[in-house]
Amino acid sequence: MSSILSTFHFSRAFSHQRMSLATYCIICCRRIGTLTPPPKSTTYWRDIRNVIKFTGSLILGGSLFLTYEVWALKKSLTLDTQVVEREKMKSYIYVHTVSLDDRENYGITYQARKELHKAVRKVLATSAKILRGPFADPFSTVDVEDHECAVWLLLRKSQSGDRAARLQSVQEMSETHHWHDYQYRIIAQACDLRTLIGLARSKESDPRFFLPPPPLPSLKEDSSIEEELRQLLASLPQTELDECIQYFTSLALSESSQSLAAQKISTHCDQIEANGGLQLLQRLYQLHKDCPKIQRNIMRIIGNMALNEHLHSTIVRSGWVSILAEAMKSPRIMEASHAARTLANLDRETMREKYHDGVYVLHPQYRTSQPIKADVLFIHGLMGAAFKTWRQQDSEQVLTEKILEDEARYTTCWPKTWLARDCPALRIISVEYDTSLSDWRTRCPVERKSIAFRSNELLRKLRAAGVGERPVIWVSHSMGGLLVKKMLLEASKKPEMSTIINNTRGIIFYSVPHHGSHLAEYSVNIRYLLFPSLEVKELSKDSPALKTLQDDFLEFAKDKNFQVLNFVETLPTYIGSMIKLHVVPVESADLGIGDLIPVDVDHLNICKPKKKDAFLYQRTLQFICETLAKDLEN
């Protein structure tokens, strides 16, 4: 009877399609235990093998299924910055894709996968808390697509309390080029101030990270941009101001020379911001797209305002970061350098230095992983500038073909183009200050342009830029060499400036009039025509200040054992169309220490190599590399 009952139960079990594996195993065991012994032992082992095969197949299949699901989930939570071809082939209209098969969406397979994902997410989140892994709490409950997960992970990482994690997230964002438009816009809208500035200072950042500036407010009725700028200048306080600021502001209000006065004002940043100056300057910037000089002056003002950290959020919200990020990628070196200075002043995540008016970083202008081991400073001379003084020597072919932006054939600033590539571990800074040959031109009536005044002003700016914290080489042309000598002497008298002296390794002088210049003598002789400026008067051979500077510096340089290299011109220089003059003779360019190398060029071209393999540049590069050899190796 028991055999019949067990056979009946066995037949019912196989007729039911949803019989579990456990029930089947129990029935098999009961059958084996209750049936009469088979005539042959092979029947017993055949049943055992069948059970093992069936059970093993289920276990193996389930294991593979679980492994695949865990792997798929892990992949969706893993940052992958490689280009995904299927992402690139998608349309630019994005919808959440679902299958049209109801069985897949609502069947047992769909529900099982969903429950399994939830379980595995909880396991990953728990392990992350225990092991401090990279998975964040929100991702234990939020179900996102694999191509969206990386965006939100990077956003969360960019707001981490760990500075290293924030920097890494910005770098990963800047190196990502396979996202869709909407993913870049997610970052642009959701990132914080630090992340946006970091992306602007990252060389490979996609321009889609930067939203267009917000709409500008409408102009007042019966008003123009010029009139609003005049009103802005008139609203600035005039009390307790530098006399020259007062002078240029009043001049701008009377003669409409607003750009000159505006760039001179550095103490009214709060008032400029409160009175809508950021939006007004942005309107002027957009209006003068065909005038790079005006745009550079506007970026110069924004860069001065960025020296005040409490204005950073206002500058970012007004949309200036997007404009500056675009200017950074300009092929014109001056535009890119003005934008780089402003963004460096905004970047307090990686920068401790502040670049005051007239101090420009030529390299590195972007964030870089390259360790910076030394500084090279370029100081121009009389009537020079931070960029044009250090351009490649002009040729007839360049002037006629107008290929100034083709750096392979011509560079408008060889320290930025050539030296930065040959010595990437250097920070290269160029300094700019106003000079004049004659007092015919409009200038501040307060006499304050002496070498002593300029040296103290530049020394303060360079110290704020971190000069002195690394080994330094000074490169100077003409009167700029006198400023370098005066700055070093002044720094030696101030304990807080001692690092500048201790870290100075060498100096390069391009036709510096250590003992005076013929230009000063010529200007004095016809002073009724030229009205020579104070700068020119100080270059006279019989100037007591010049002789004292030479004697004091020569003794000081010998004591400090500075490495010195002197270049001097051998050809006369044309000043205008009528005057031909040997500005700095050989005997005046001889400092008394270091090599003195005559070069067959005039005074203007002594610091402008014809090409990269020219002797003038190669000898300069050799001096820098040899003088900084130990510092660059460490």
Image (cartoon, rainbow, N blue to C red):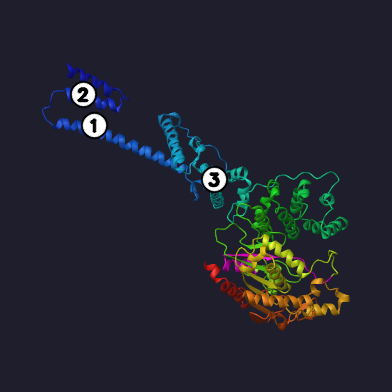
Residue 422 lies in the magenta stretch: yes
In the rendered image, the vertical position of residue 333 relative to residue 97, given as above or below: below
Q: Residue at x 71, y 83 (%)?
A: 586
Please provide percent x and percent y for residue 296: 73, 59
Name the residue carrying label 3: 157
Frontmost of labels 3 and 2 is 3
Please provide percent x and percent y for residue 380: 71, 70
* Image quadrant assignment for residue 394: bottom right
Name the residue carrying label 1: 51
Q: Label 3, secondary structure: give it.
A: helix
Count of residue discs: 3
Whichever of callouts 1 and 3 sits on the residue coming sooner in the sequence is 1
Residue 138 lies in the magenta stretch: no
Give the magenta-colored segment's residue range.
Answer: 414-438
Q: Residue at x 86, y 73 (%)?
A: 531
Whichever of callouts 3 and 2 sits on the residue coming sooner in the sequence is 2
Frontmost of labels 2 and 1 is 2
Query: Label 3 is placed on what type of residue?
Result: Lys
Please provide percent x and percent y for residue 590: 69, 81
Relative to 59, is 590 on the left or the right? right
Query: Label 2 is placed on what type of residue?
Result: Arg
Name the residue carrying label 2: 30
The 10 Å Cα crowd at callout 2, few under 14, some 14 to 19, many 20 or more, is: some
In the rendered image, the vertical position of residue 158 relative to residue 465, given as above or below: above
Quote the CA–CA distance across marks 3 and 2.
Answer: 60 Å
The 10 Å Cα crowd at callout 3, few under 14, some 14 to 19, many 20 or more, is: many
Please provide percent x and percent y for residue 397: 68, 73
In the rendered image, the vertical position of residue 269 relative to residue 493, given as above or below: above
* Image quadrant assignment for residue 565: bottom right
Query: Label 1 is placed on what type of residue?
Result: Val
Q: Label 2, secondary structure: give it.
A: helix
